[in-house]
Amino acid sequence: MPLYESVLIARNDVSQTQVETIVTDIETLLAQDGGVIEKREFWGLRSLAYRIKKNRKGHYVLLGLNARPDQIREMERQLGLNEDILRVLTLRVDEIDPNPSAILSRKGEDRGDRAAPRGVGGKPAGRFDSGRGDDREEFRARGEREDADLGVE
């Protein structure tokens, strides 16, 4: 049977258990004719690039499917009728990668990056802020020069 990867986006006001129930329903639908979900990843609640049906966020799920094309069409039809599903994208692939997807591996890296650079006062350094305070040599020299111009010793 051909292999597919499918990404679902569910509405943000449904719970995680409801999303898992939808995936379980897909699994039972595919299992009726010998299809199998080989990989499932819950990416969590993520922001959408643009509003879809008045939603700004959605629950993302990646599924690795081993099923016949008619089963995939029926799955997409059922998901299209479900009001909790905003979008579905299914692609045929040569193989299903058992490793975590780029989204999940990037999530772990993001957590480490947040704690790394700290600026003055424990705040993160801004986009153009080097994180150094005003005690650098050039500020001290500038201050001394201004004091000399004003006649202050």
Image: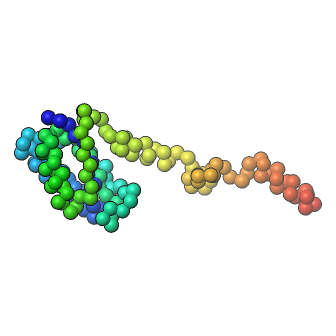
The reply, left or right, for residue 96 in relation to residue 110 is left
Residue that extends furthest to the top in the rendered view of this protein? 94
Residue that extends furthest to the right in the rendered view of this protein? 151
Residue 106: x %, y % from top left: 40, 43
Q: Quadrant of the N terminus?
A: top left
Q: Which residue lies at the image location 19% right of the left edge and 57% below the top edge?
A: 80
Q: Is residue 17 visible?
A: no
Image quarter of residue 59: bottom left
Q: Quadrant of the C terminus?
A: bottom right
Q: Which residue lies at the image location 28% right of the left edge and 64% below the top edge?
A: 13
Q: Is residue 28 above or below residue 48?
A: above
The reply, left or right, for residue 47 in relation to residue 67 is right
The reply, left or right, for residue 73 in relation to residue 135 is left
Say which of 96 and 70 sits in front: 70
Say which of 121 and 76 sits in front: 76
Residue 111: x %, y % from top left: 43, 47
Say which of 61 and 107 sits in front: 61
Q: Which residue lies at the image location 58% right of the left edge and 53% below the top edge?
A: 126
Q: Which residue lies at the image location 12% right of the left edge and 44% below the top edge?
A: 70
Residue 129: x %, y % from top left: 63, 52
Image quarter of residue 104: top left
The reply, left or right, for residue 118 in relation to residue 142 is left
Say which of 1 and 119 sits in front: 1
Q: Is residue 137 visible?
A: yes
Q: Is residue 24 above or below residue 11?
A: above
